Image (cartoon, rainbow, N blue to C red):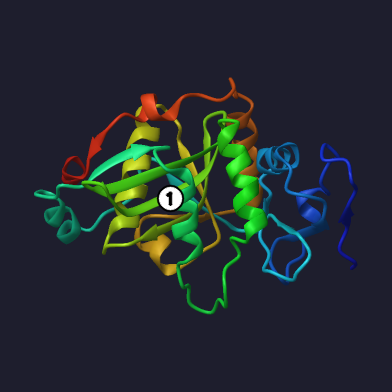
Amino acid sequence: MSLPWLPADPLAPFPPAEQALRDPDGLLAAGGDLSPARLLNAYRHGIFPWYSQGQPLLWWTPDPRMVFRSDGVRLSSRFRRSLRRSPWTLRADGDFGAVVAACALVRRPGQRGTWITDDMRAAYGALHRLGHAHSIEVRDGDELVGGLYGVAIGRMFFAESMFSARTGGSKVALAGLARRLHEWQWPLIDAQVENPHLVAMGARPWPRTEFLRQLATLVAEDTGPASWPRRFGRMAAADLAV
């Protein structure tokens, strides 16, 4: 089966999810661009870009899909105890570019280089300026010790990548994000594909059909970009020890 290539129109529909390949799992289409219109159209339909430098732009919708419930992110008892006296604080959108840059430097098992290419950084930077992409920063004073970034549409958050400059920094970012989303009644966080770290923190594989069914309802509630710095506020990492 040949892989469909997307037309130039960024609003052109993607192929149906059921046409995605089984090997590699979820590969749906190639080509197109990383314009905000195309990226938002992709996320609304459970599709995300993922490719390496030198490859064509590739679009994915894996089955199963790794998903966190916003009330289901887990921190171990030992780690929560270590947070009780932590001076770390969390905020949103304080330095989106620094978080994306730090994520691009993370060395991941079995991966040469990074999939967060210059084009990807520019694309998500554009989404951030439009109010659709957000970062969570974990700081010790002025030092950035961990964080994550992703895309928000409606009541759905699509996590893209996270990093730790200090042990546990990414865990704190994810747990803090989940707590706020649960308070806002956003039930799900898309984690895309399985890895042991995500599973240990509570991510679970969902059949793609179920993920897409719930996604359609959540993204339909889109009321436009919101000010995350004000809405997220300031959170103490020590509060996550409870």
State which quadrant residue 216 falls in.
top right
Q: Position of residue 11 (x, y in %)?
A: 82, 36
Left or right: where 30 falls relative to 183: right
In the displayed structure, 161 sits above or below 209; it is below
**Residue 229 visible, this orientation:** yes
Q: Position of residue 174 (x, y in %)?
A: 37, 49
Going by the numbered disc 1, the residue's amino acid type is Leu
Nearer to the camera, 167 or 201 = 167
**Furthest-left residue in view?**
85
Q: Position of residue 59 (x, y in %)?
A: 73, 56
Residue wearing tag 1: 148
**Residue 210 visible, this orientation:** no
At 11% from the left edge and 48% from the top edge, which residue is drawn?
A: 84
At 66% from the left edge and 45% from the top edge, which residue is drawn?
A: 46
Which image quarter holds the N terminus? Answer: bottom right
**Furthest-top residue in view?**
223
State which quadrant residue 197 falls in.
bottom left
Q: Position of residue 18 (x, y in %)?
A: 78, 53
